[in-house]
């Protein structure tokens, strides 16, 4: 079994994977950040330099780590797994540049002359988009598919009240011979986060809570959080609030803090939940045993805040998170294919996940959890699946300030709140559930190649979806640049996420 996809589990077990966003300003979207050495030492109870099945939290994780099948895990095996090298036939230094943080240049593109554009006439004109530039998007996306930078993708542009572009390219599943289709289902990864945040805001509009209420009113495990300061645990000076969870200013994080006692408790809870039967309550209670990175509200750190927000939603509404979402958000918006799993009658529409060990090479990847099995642990940070059409309806509702097709989901003034900066951190701006730029922009992305942004100033939003784990090819960047050109948006008026945002 190849383990690049299993790295998702390893990182999530440690709460370490930045699924589509950034941890602090140094970590680009979707890159893991944790200390394999620190975790190994913590789990190696007898100090013999090897991990037994009893020392690793979770039988499946142990199986993945034990690459040579000798019944124990060496430091070398753990390090190889943590770096994503396990199971790959690579010599020293091979593909190292591809693994370094940042956006790769990808494989060389074939000449544009070998590809034909599609027809863009009335729909482009109605949306105020230049058909000639849309034709260039067609050709550019086909070139990236041919270069095997991606297996396939769907791209959508909505401008001036009209859908002006909606095209599919490449394959949903190369091995099965399935072309990408308009209703193909994608793993959203961190594009789950805005959906969870806005579900919480529906409850806020109903008067269920205030943005600055202590979350401990409904989730008592967070009544007395501790903060790690200068190697010492100190009481939190303020309670954690829903606003802090939605803006990643709670002090929660992915990974482990150096010197933190009891590190890895949330990681073990995550593994237990995936193994069977655990809930968000279990996960939250475990996470509450670990210290915060900074005083609540005092900074920004991308982490498990939205997962804990999911637990808060469940407690406020008195129902599982998936039910609350169907009642308050996805149901009213008729997002019929958006959920935490894919039922049997829709499995044929699920995109194959691919891994890319080097530019121009695509291989079937592996997923952390089987999306065809309904979970009991609904992870609000990365657990949902959807289609481009469904996410279009979500974006339309936001651009319309809370309403769609005569149905009001959120108050207009509440939608305005998500576009405002809610963090106090130099160089970082973050709204409620997504990154903002202070100029009418809101968006986010997922580690498997899903991206969206909404630009209220220019009455535009765009969605891009592909399925490559730890997606880093330049296809999305090329698409985004051409979107601005097609809409006639000059450089000074373009959506540009701040440093540390979902720029990918």
Image (tube, grey):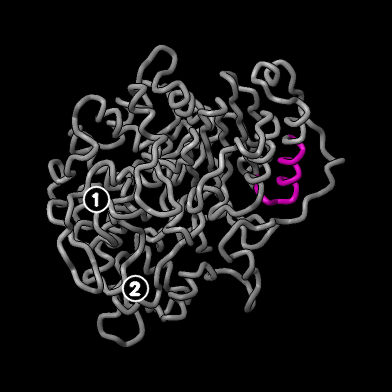
Taking the image as shown, residue 133 lies to the left or right of residue 320, namely right
Residue at mark 1: 278
Q: Which residue does the image show at 55% across and 25% down from the upper left?
A: 459
* Name of the residue lying farthest toward the top: 406
Residue 18, image quadrant: bottom left
The spot of residue 398 in percent (x, y) is 44, 27
Residue 298 vertical position relative to residue 328 in the rendered view, above or below? below
Query: How many numbered marks have been drawn onto this rendered protein structure?
Result: 2
Residue 294 visible at all: yes
| Disc number placed over residue 462 in the picture, else none | none
Q: Earlier in the sequence, mark 1 or mark 2?
A: 2
Eye-nearest disc, 1 or 2: 2
Q: Nearer the viewer, residue 352 or 160?
A: 160
Q: Which residue does the image show at 52% across and 49% down from the upper left?
A: 448
The spot of residue 168 in percent (x, y) is 65, 33
Residue at mark 2: 39
Between the C-alphas of marks 1 and 2, the distance is 23 Å
The spot of residue 331 in percent (x, y) is 36, 23
Which span of residues is magenta-colored? 138-151
Is 146 contained in the magenta span?
yes
Residue 255, image quadrant: bottom left
Residue 302 visible at all: no
Taking the image as shown, residue 475 lies to the left or right of residue 20, namely right
Q: Secondary structure at mark 2?
A: helix
Q: Which residue does the image show at 45% across and 41% down from the upper left?
A: 436
């Amino acid at each position: 079994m190849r383990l690049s996809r299993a790295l998702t589990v390893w990182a999530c077990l440690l709460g370490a994977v930045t699924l589509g966003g950034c941890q602090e300003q140094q970590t680009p979207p979707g890159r893991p950040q944790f200390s394999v050495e620190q975790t190994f030492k913590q789990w190696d109870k007898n100090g013999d330099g090897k991990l037994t099945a009893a020392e690793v939290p979770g039988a499946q994780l142990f199986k993945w780590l034990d690459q040579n099948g000798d019944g124990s895990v060496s430091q070398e095996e753990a390090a190889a797994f943590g770096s994503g090298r396990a199971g790959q036939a690579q010599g020293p230094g091979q593909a190292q540049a591809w693994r370094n943080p940042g956006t790769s240049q990808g494989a060389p593109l074939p000449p544009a002359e070998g590809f034909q554009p599609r027809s863009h006439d009335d729909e482009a004109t109605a949306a105020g988009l230049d058909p000639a530039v849309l034709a260039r998007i067609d050709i550019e996306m086909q070139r990236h598919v041919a270069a095997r930078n991606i297996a396939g993708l769907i791209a959508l542009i909505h401008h001036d009240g009209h859908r002006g572009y909606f095209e599919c390219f490449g394959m949903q599943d190369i091995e099965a011979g399935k072309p990408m289709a308009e209703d193909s289902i994608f793993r959203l990864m961190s594009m789950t986060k805005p959906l969870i945040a806005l579900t919480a805001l529906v409850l806020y509009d109903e008067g269920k809570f205030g943005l600055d209420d202590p979350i401990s009113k409904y989730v008592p495990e967070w009544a007395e959080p501790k903060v790690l300061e200068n190697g010492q645990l100190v009481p939190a000076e303020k309670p954690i609030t829903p606003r802090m969870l939605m803006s990643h200013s709670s002090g929660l994080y992915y990974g482990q803090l150096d010197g933190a006692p009891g590190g890895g408790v949330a990681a073990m809870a995550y593994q237990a939940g995936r193994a069977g039967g655990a809930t968000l309550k279990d996960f939250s209670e475990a996470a509450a045993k670990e210290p915060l990175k900074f005083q609540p509200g005092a900074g920004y750190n991308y982490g498990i805040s939205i997962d804990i927000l999911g637990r808060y939603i469940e407690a406020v509404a008195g129902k599982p998170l998936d039910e609350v979402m169907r009642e308050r958000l996805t149901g009213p918006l008729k997002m019929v294919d958006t959920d935490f799993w894919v039922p049997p009658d829709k499995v044929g529409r699920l995109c194959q996940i691919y891994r890319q060990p080097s530019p121009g090479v695509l291989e079937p990847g592996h997923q952390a959890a089987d999306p065809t099995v309904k979970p009991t642990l609904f992870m609000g940070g990365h657990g949902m699946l959807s289609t481009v059409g469904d996410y279009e309806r979500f974006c339309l509702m936001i651009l319309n300030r809370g309403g769609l097709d005569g149905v009001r989901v959120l108050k207009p003034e509440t939608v305005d709140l998500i576009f405002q900066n809610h963090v106090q951190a130099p160089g970082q701006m973050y709204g409620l559930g997504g990154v903002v730029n202070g100029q009418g922009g809101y968006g986010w992305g997922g580690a498997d190649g899903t991206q969206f942004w909404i630009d209220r100033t220019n009455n535009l939003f765009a969605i891009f979806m592909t399925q490559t784990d730890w997606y880093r090819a330049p296809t999305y960047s090329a698409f985004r640049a051409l979107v601005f050109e097609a809409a006639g948006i000059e450089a000074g008026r373009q959506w540009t996420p701040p440093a540390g945002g979902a720029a990918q």
